[in-house]
Amino acid sequence: MRLMSFVYAAESTSRFGVIVDDSVIDLVEAARELAYPERSMPSNLTAFAAAGESVLATATEIMDRFRELSDDSSQVNFSWVYPVSGVRFLPPLLNPPKVIAVGLVLTVGGHWMLGQLIAFTNELFNSIPSLLAGG
């Protein structure tokens, strides 16, 4: 299962979903349209990750249902399915609670290269927001 956060075309609303073949399924809209009211889908991927097994099972059911429906007809048009080419990938977790980075110690001839280490660390931490982008 390839989960993602995305924005469709010229819209400004961020969504989250799953990639199936060459399509992206908006899980929130799919759950609403396929009538899963007893199992509401969280509104973002951070909440989805925290929700646990029940929403994962619902997402799997939505993917299976999509495959069934799309196999039945080649002309199916769902309001909750977007072509991958029409979406802009966002960072998977839009507001992550933590970002963990890995440090690196460089040695040359037994001496630390402190200046290079500081420069590398500053560059790494300054680039973290762009590293989170999904695509």
Image (tube, rainbow, N blue to C red):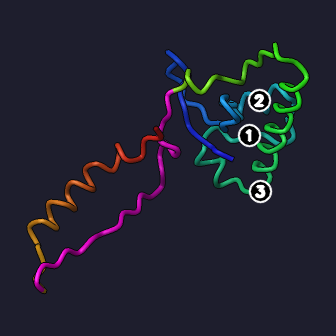
Q: Residue at x 69, y 47 (%)?
A: 1
Residue 55 at what x, y percent from top left?
A: 76, 48
Query: Sequence order check: which comes first, mark 3 or mark 1?
Result: 1
Q: Say which residue label 2 marks.
A: 30
Q: Residue at x 33, y 50 (%)?
A: 128
Residue 89 at what x, y percent from top left?
A: 50, 33
Q: Nearer the viewer, residue 70 or 87?
A: 70
Q: CA distance from mark 2 to mark 1?
A: 9 Å
The amino acid at mark 2 is Ala
Q: Which residues are magenta?
A: 88-109
Residue 93's place in the image compared with 32, above or below, is: below
Residue 133's place in the image compared with 98, above or below, is: above
Q: Say which residue label 1 marks.
A: 41
The disc at residue 53 is 3
In the picture, measured across the screen, residue 94 lies left or right of residue 51, that is left
Residue 55 belongs to the span the image colors magenta: no
Residue 135 at what x, y percent from top left?
A: 46, 38
Query: Sequence order check: which comes first, mark 2 or mark 1?
Result: 2
Q: Are marks 2 and 1 in contact (CB under 8 Å)?
A: yes
Q: Residue at x 60, y 44 (%)?
A: 45
Label 2: which secondary element: helix
The amino acid at mark 3 is Glu
Numbered label tally: 3
Residue 9's place in the image compared with 134, above or below, is: above
In the picture, measured across the screen, residue 28 lies left or right of residue 91, that is right
Q: Residue furthest bottom?
A: 110
